[in-house]
Each structure stands twice: as C-alpha cells, then as structure tokens.
Image (tube, helix red, strand yellow):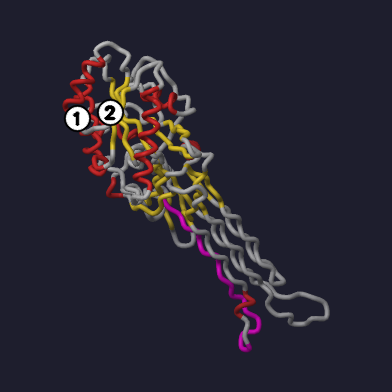
Amino acid sequence: MFVDHIRIFAQAGDGGDGSASFRRESFVPRGGPDGGDGGRGGSIVLRADTHTDNLTPFFYEPIVKAKAGERGGGRQCFGKSAPDKIVPVPIGTIVYRLPDEEPAGPDPMVTHGDGAMFVDFAKTPKGEGREKRDRKAPVDPNELELIADLTKPGQEFVLCKGGKGGIGNVHFKSSKNQAPTQYTEGTPGEQGYFYLELRKIADAGLVGYPNAGKSTLLGRISQAHPKIAPYPFTTLTPHIGVVELPGYRRVTVADIPGLIEGAHENVGLGHDFLRHIVRCKLLVFVLDMAGSEGREPLEDLRTLRKELDLYDPKLSERPWIVVANKMDLPEAKEKMKYFKTRYKKLTVIPVAEGEKTGVAKLKKVLAEMIAETAEEPAATDEAEAPSTPE
C-alpha cells in the first residue's frame, strides 16, 4: 500500500501535577513543605527520514499520542519528564492544520447533574450514527493551514508541544504561610487534527500518458527497477531513480504514473499523481512517437501541458524537454519529422529500444539543465494548499 496523503490526530502528553507533601523525619519537628514539581509531558516531533518513503504507518495508526509526565513527590522530588515521541516521515512531507472535527461540549449521551453524572442509554452512544470520514479522502483547501514543509533529511518539527509540569507546595511557603497545601496541576499537552501530504522531491519528473514507456526509460537511465508490463497504469506509485553522472554527480528522476485528459479534475488517478510533479525542477515529457496506442504525439503533448497548467499554472513555467520514445517502431520517424516542424526550438531526444545513443544524450541534457536551475530559487519552497475540492 502506498499512502501519500492522510488525516491524523496528534496529542502531546500532559504535564504531571505538583505534589503537596510535608517533611516527616525524626527529631525534625515542623519539617515544612517539601512537595516536588511534576514532570514535563512528551512532545510529538516529526522528523524527515531518508529511510521512510510514504505515509502508510499513519493509515494503521492515525492517532499519535505521547506519554504524560509523572507527578511530583515528597522530599522535593521532581516527577519524571516523558520522552518526546519522534515520528519519522518521508522527506517532502507537508503538514497542514485542520479544524477540530469533534463537536465541542459534553457527550450527547451524558447528562450532568449536581455533583453526579447520569448516562442516558436511550441516546446514541459516542461514535455511532456519525458519518465516518475517509482519512485518505480529499480535503477542502479552505480548511487547511500550512504549518510545516519538511524538505531536508533530519529536519524536525514539533507538531504538538507537551504540557508543563505543575509546581509543588514548597514554592508557596512564606513567613506568613509556613504550611501551604497549595499546588498546581500540570498543563494539558497540545492536540489537534492534521493533514499530511507527501510530495516527492526529485530534480526531474517523467510525465506522459499510460504505456508511453516512462518506467522502461527510468530503468535504462538509472538503477531503479519499476514494474513494467504491456498494459496501462502499470505504475501505481511514483518511483525515484538516481542517475549517475561523470564527476561524481547525480540527478534524481521521478517516474510519475500515467496522466490522462481531465487529470486536473481528479479524473482517473489525477491528484494522486499530479502532487508529485510540483517539486520537480525539470519536466521530461515522454511521448509515444510511433502512436502505438492510437494517439498522436502532438495531441498528447498539448493535453499533458494543458493538464499541468490547469492543475498549477506555475508548472507551465518550468523548463521542459521531450523524449521521443519507441523510435524503433514503424511510423515513428515520419511522425518525428512532422513533430519537429511544429516545435523547431524544442529539445527533442529520440530513444529507441536497444540503442544507447539516446539514453546517453538524455543523461547529458539532464546534467546541463539541472545545473542551470541549481542556482535558481526553488519554485517549490513555498508549499500551497492542495487545489482538490471536497
């Protein structure tokens, strides 16, 4: 299972209560207060981890909680602070804050009286009769508040801060109050609903229709081994390959699963794939130049460019090239000539099965164009809320 967006609930640990105690020791009359402070509650910290590639663990455990701090003790003993809960997330994870989903106030099946609480079994129990929301379903962009974008390995973000421990009665002693019984309770830890979205980070992204040969191309230019089969939508999750270049340089290339017309409106697997293109510095359109699927390469390119522009207008401003794939099939050369007459200044790299010339040229072009964009400010530093309607 591959999960790249999900709702979660996080709750940090509460702080421990302070203690109200007095010194009890032989030959020490009126020992005085010695209540210790409570421990700090554990915080929930998200850490970008290179060994985590998706958000699947949150699908099975959507509720993340940290431990509470311990209560203070006598003899001015401090309560033990709870450890922070470190949660690994993939690099490229964007964190949004969601409004509280649970209704405020007491539970509808509970009636509160004077000093007592009565349960009305005739009313609906908690959790029943309510609409169950899909944690992977799209969300309303107006509900989202961007709070973090984890783009570097080891980068951390405190999602929920643990509560502070209460203070013991030793802090309340004075010349007028020599035997205080006051103490404070620990503060509750922060909690809330959050929306996590993964956007793969790669230098270049392979964009094309299903069965255009993107996975095969990625396997030829890198050591990646994506699934390859002669039917559409073979690739259901984005794959990233590392292309080794001369001079100990490397470029990361993402194989974006096939797009179709209407992808910006979530047709097919639309938004599940388009979100991973946003961070790519260079777009590589892989076209079936032979038209083996009954489509024309010119129309394919126009449709793909249109879908990207409708999803995010900034994508149409990115540098892009075209890989003319399947040049070993009949009619590919003739359509290639016609294609070049329409795009004379466009970089078009022909690639054929069994030939290494096109693959070597593609690596060279990737190295040159990625180097040109390396010093430019990244267009994906400022993450935006998804444009997916509810």
Coordinates of residue 368 in the picture (x, y in percent):
36, 39
Which residue occupies 37% across, 48% down?
101
Q: Can residue 210 be seen in this snapshot?
A: no
Name the image quarter holding residue 347: top left
**Amino acid under disc 2:** Val
Q: Residue furthest right?
A: 27
> In the rendered structure, does residue 178 fall within the stretch colored magenta?
yes
Secondary structure beneath label 1: loop
Give the crowd class for mark 2: few <14, some 14-19, many >=20 residues within 10 Å: some
Name the residue carrying label 2.
Answer: 348
Name the image quarter holding residue 218: top left
Viewer-proximal residue among 247 and 193: 247
Q: Is residue 312 above or below residue 172?
A: above
Circle nearer the N terminus (2, 1): 1
Q: Residue furthest bottom?
A: 175
In the image: residue 274, left or right of residue 174: left
Contact check, label 2 and label 1, Cβ < 8 Å? yes
In the image: residue 69, left or right of residue 143: right
Q: Is residue 276 above or below residue 191?
A: above
Tell me which secondary structure the magenta stretch mostly adopts.
Answer: loop
Viewer-proximal residue among 134 and 160: 160
Q: CA distance from mark 2 to mark 1?
A: 9 Å
Name the residue carrying label 1.
Answer: 343
Which residue occupies 27% across, 41% down?
315
Specify the segment rendered in magenta: 175-193
Q: Quadrant of the C terminus?
A: top left
In the image: residue 208, left or right of residue 296: right
Viewer-proximal residue among 182 and 157: 157
**Amino acid under disc 1:** Tyr
